[in-house]
Image (cartoon, rainbow, N blue to C red):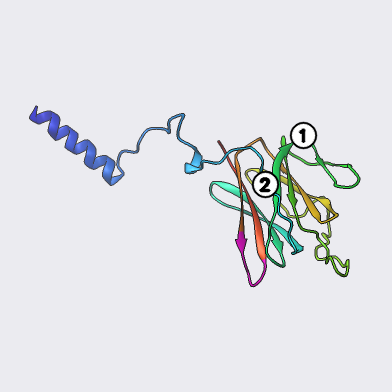
Amino acid sequence: MKKFHTWLTVIVMAVGLGFLAPGPASATTSYCGLVWGSLAESNPAMSAASVTNVRTGQHYCFDRMVVDLNGPVAGYNVRYVDNVAQDGSGNLVPLRGRAFIQVTVTAPSYDSETGSATYSPANQAELSNVAGYQTFRQVAWAGSFEGYTNVGLGVRARLPFRVFTLDGPGSGSRLVVDVAHFW
């Protein structure tokens, strides 16, 4: 019995010191501890703000797309779709990837009083260069029509995502869409 306790003490100390790594994650353990899903996320409120930019970034566990607004963001609808379509025309937006996310911000990309553009991408097919990203394949403009702005996000597979808003900088705000690298 004393030998057993000695070995048990050695094993516990080795694990605690990092000499023995725990085994592979079980089927119930999520990737990077993320507990996201792949169902639509939305908030139907309309925003008085306007879209001013779309940008992306890479993180250890996910790729991130950020939509900047010049005031408080209020509403959005983010969901997987078979095809991303432009509001108004219904034209399909071609995207690279095996799955597609339509990001709709309930805010225009123009000043609602003057009609002047607050965001006019130079290349509508490539809003951000996502070459080398683990999950993102393409970020494309899908238009702004009657107070709604749409962005198509091509991803490598139907993966879990989350959506949230952040205040700032200044009086602006951000709509954030994170898509995990794995389940």
The mark nearer the N terminus, 2 or 1, is 2
Q: Secondary structure at mark 2?
A: strand
Q: Position of residue 168 (x, y in %)?
A: 62, 67
User: What residue do we see at 57% from left, 52% from top?
Assistant: 59
* Residue 54 picture quarter: bottom right
Quadrant of the image containing the N terminus? top left
Q: Position of residue 90 (x, y in %)?
A: 88, 42
Q: Nearer the viewer, residue 94 or 49?
A: 49
The residue that disc 1 covers is 82
Question: Within 10 angstroms of label 1, few (less than 14), some, or many (20 or more) residues?
Answer: few
Mark 2 and mark 1: span between their CA atoms?
A: 18 Å
Quadrant of the image containing the C terminus? top right
Magenta span covers which residues? Answer: 166-172
Task: Look at the picture and state if 77 lies above or below 120.
Answer: above
User: What residue do we see at 89% from left, 47% from top?
Assistant: 88
The type of residue carrying mark 2 is Ser
User: What residue do we see at 71% from left, 47% from top?
Assistant: 77
Residue extending farthest to the bottom is 170
Q: Nearer the viewer, residue 12 or 164?
A: 164
The residue that disc 2 covers is 42
Q: Position of residue 144 (x, y in %)?
A: 84, 54
Task: Look at the picture and state if 1 lies above or below 128.
Answer: above
Assign the magenta stretch its main secondary structure: loop
Residue extending farthest to the top is 1
